[in-house]
Image (cartoon, grey):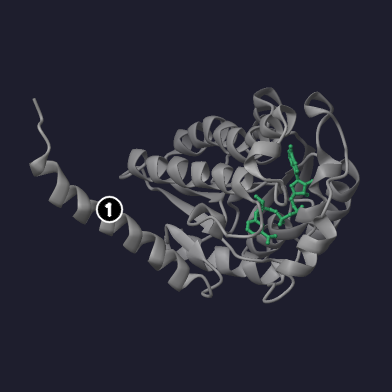
């Protein structure tokens, strides 16, 4: 996609952080913006900020973990602007700082509900809407650099698991939309200066409601180095949609560690090459 004028984009998790940064960049490029978020107050402020730039925008309160809520957001987009061209499935929550064995069943439901099912609900609702008009479009799913490796020492297995799932969904979607005129990207940022470590406050009631998670202040400091501004990430996403990039990377510091992970997989293939002929297959 190169021309965003008069096109419509929906961005989930748009009340703050990366979602708002993407919404701003798309608005600046001429798109109509549907901001969807679970937090009504910040959503209203964000929608006003987008409108103040001269763009057309609406805010829709939505919980991405609830398929009906996402369907209602999609309907609101069509009611307001007539067609949908870009979907940014961005809403997500942190689950860093707790070892995998200590994450509670409710926390698993919540992190999978928002980070994985939120993307699934967005794909199920928004992709048919983009297909419907035949003009093409683009889907961006927000993963993380944690879609590509699990960072040691941060106890972020549950979060990384959810973000690996976003990568699999995005790879599948890219294959399934080939030739349709609808591009697919996965945004895989490293640290971005947002309120992600306050996300326990946004936990919906059916997952146990708002709570406070230990160690989040320490995590904020641990991630503080090399944090990007959300607006910079938003502009990077706009450029990547224009260039139809699948992997949207923003930080380069993890190049070696992710390369080492891939080398480990390649070495496992080498061992299989060596071992399998010597094993009885009958
Ligand atoms: N900040 C980072 O360093 C970083 C790095 C990599 C990936 N990400 C990802 O970026 C995305 C955006 O996060 P952010 O860093 O901008 O944090 P953020 O907390 O500023 O923004 C997330 C937004 O999602 C909303 N949200 C939370 N639960 C929701 C739900 N159930 N339904 C709808 N909206 C909901 C929040 O209200 C918030 O406005 C997330 O998917 C996150 O995992 C963030």
Residue 89 visible in rendering: no
Image coords of residue 7 (percent x, y): 58, 51
The residue positioned farthest toward the right in the image shown: 41
Check disc 1 and report its element: helix, strand or loop.
Answer: helix
Image coords of residue 248 (percent x, y): 49, 62
Q: Is mark 1 within 8 Å of ligand 1?
A: no
Which residue is at a point 64% across and 60% down the rendered structure image? 153
Q: Quadrant of the C terminus?
A: top left
Camera-nearest residue between 135 and 188: 188
In the rendered image, which quarter is residue 221 located in?
bottom right
Camera-nearest residue between 19 and 276: 276
In the rendered image, which quarter is residue 53 located in?
bottom right
Q: Which residue is mark 1?
A: 268
Which residue is at a point 49% across and 57% down the rendered structure image? 149
Image coords of residue 49 (percent x, y): 83, 60
| Apparent side of residue 116 relative to residue 45 in the rendered image (left or right) | left
Which residue is at a point 56% across and 51% down the rendered structure image? 143
- Total marks placed: 1
| Apparent side of residue 256 relative to residue 160 in the rendered image (left or right) | left
Residue 224 visible in rendering: yes
Image coords of residue 120 (percent x, y): 55, 33
Which residue is at a point 27% across and 58% down the rendered structure image? 266
In the image, residue 104 above or below residue 46: above
In the image, residue 192 above or below residue 253: above
In the image, residue 135 above or below residue 125: below
| Apparent side of residue 33 relative to residue 135 in the rendered image (left or right) | right
């Amino acid at each position: 996609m190169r021309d965003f004028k008069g096109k419509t984009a929906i961005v989930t998790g748009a009340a703050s952080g990366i979602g708002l940064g993407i919404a701003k960049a798309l608005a600046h490029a001429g798109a109509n913006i549907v901001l969807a978020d679970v937090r009504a107050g910040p959503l209203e402020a964000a929608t006003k900020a987008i409108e103040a730039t001269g763009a057309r925008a609406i805010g829709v309160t939505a919980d991405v973990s609830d398929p009906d809520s996402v369907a209602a957001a999609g309907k609101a987009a069509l009611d307001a602007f007539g067609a949908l061209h870009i979907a940014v499935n961005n809403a997500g929550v942190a689950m860093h700082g707790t070892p995998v064995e200590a994450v509670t069943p409710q926390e698993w439901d919540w992190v999978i509900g928002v980070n994985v099912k939120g993307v699934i609900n967005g794909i199920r609702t928004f992709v048919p809407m983009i297909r419907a008009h035949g003009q093409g479009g683009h889907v961006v799913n927000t993963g993380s650099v944690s879609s590509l490796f699990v960072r040691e020492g941060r106890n972020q297995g549950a979060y990384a698991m959810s973000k690996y799932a976003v990568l699999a969904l995005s790879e599948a979607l890219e294959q399934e939309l080939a030739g349709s005129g609808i591009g697919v990207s996965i945004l895989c940022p490293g640290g971005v200066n947002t309120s992600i470590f306050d996300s326990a406050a946004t936990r919906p009631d059916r997952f146990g409601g708002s709570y406070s998670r230990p160690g989040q202040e320490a995590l904020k400091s641990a991630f503080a180095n090399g944090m990007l501004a959300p607006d910079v990430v938003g502009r990077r996403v706009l450029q990547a949609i224009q260039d139809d990039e699948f992997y949207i990377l923003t930080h380069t510091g993890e190049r070696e560690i992710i390369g080492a992970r891939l080398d480990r997989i390649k070495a496992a293939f080498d061992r299989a090459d060596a071992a399998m002929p010597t094993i009885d297959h009958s």
